[in-house]
Amino acid sequence: MSSHQQDQTTDPKEHFVSLMRGLGTRTVLYQESVAASLGLYNHDFISVDILREKGPITAGELSKLTGLATSSVTALIDRLEKIGYVRRQNDPKDRRKVIIVPEYEQKEEVSNTYHPLHTAMITLASSYTDEELALITQFLGKASTVLEEQIHDLSSNKPY
C-alpha cells in the first residue's frame, strides 16, 4: 500500500498513527538541517539536544542514551567542547566521573537557528485554548514515553 493510500484510511486511529510517523520523519529532517546549518554531525546535534533536555550528565549516561560506544562519545564530547557547546566538569559525588555540561544555549548561532521554529510553534500553540494545550501536552509526554520504550526495546534486541 502506498503512503498516499495510507493517508486516506477511514480509521481515525490509523490516520493518526500515519500523521505521527510523518511528524517524526519531519522532526528528524529538521534536526539534520539544524545540525548541518551549525556545522555539526547529526549525532553531535542529537547529543546536544539530549543534554538540553536532560541537563548535565556523565559521558556513560550520554553513551546509553545515544546508543554510541563510549569511545565515540568521548570523541563527540571533544568536538563539542572544542567549539564551546559543552564543558567537562568533575562530578562532586564521584571524582572518577566527569559530567558533561551543556553550554550551547547561550551561543547566538543556536538561538538564531531555533528562533523561527520557536516563534512558529508559539503561534501554533496560541491557536489552542489552555485546556486543549493541556491535553496536547499530556499526549506529547505520553508519546515520548512510548518512543523511549520502543527505543529501549529495539536497542535491547540487537543481534550483536
Image: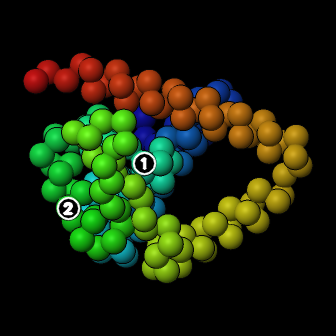
Marks 2 & 1, CB-CB < 8 Å contact: no
Q: Is residue 9 left or right of residue 156?
A: right
Q: Residues within 10 Å of mark 2 (few under 14, many from 20)?
A: some
Q: Please, what secondary structure does the residue beneath circle 2 have?
A: helix
Residue at left offset 27%, top offset 27%: 155
Sequence-wise first label, 2 or 1: 1
Q: Can residue 10 be seen by looking at this rendering?
A: no
Q: Amino acid at mark 1?
A: Pro
Vertical arrangement, residue 82 with respect to residue 22, above or below: below
Q: Residues within 10 Å of mark 1 (few under 14, many from 20)?
A: many
Q: Please, what secondary structure does the residue beneath circle 1 have?
A: loop
Q: Can residue 153 be seen by looking at this rendering?
A: yes
Vertical arrangement, residue 51 with respect to residue 70, above or below: below
Residue highlighted by disc 1: 56
The quadrant of the image that shows the N terminus is top left
Q: Is residue 2 left or right of residue 120?
A: left
Residue at left offset 36%, top offset 36%: 93
The quadrant of the image that shows the C terminus is top left
Residue 12, how many percent across, how many down? 68, 30
Residue highlighted by disc 2: 78
For the rendered model, the colour scheme is: rainbow
Q: Is residue 44 left or right of residue 54?
A: left
Residue 157, how many percent across, how many down? 24, 19
Vertical arrangement, residue 142 with respect to residue 103, above or below: above
Vertical arrangement, residue 146 with respect to residue 114, above or below: above
Work out whether residue 26 or residue 139 is closer to the camera in this orientation and state it. 139
Q: Amino acid at mark 2?
A: Asp
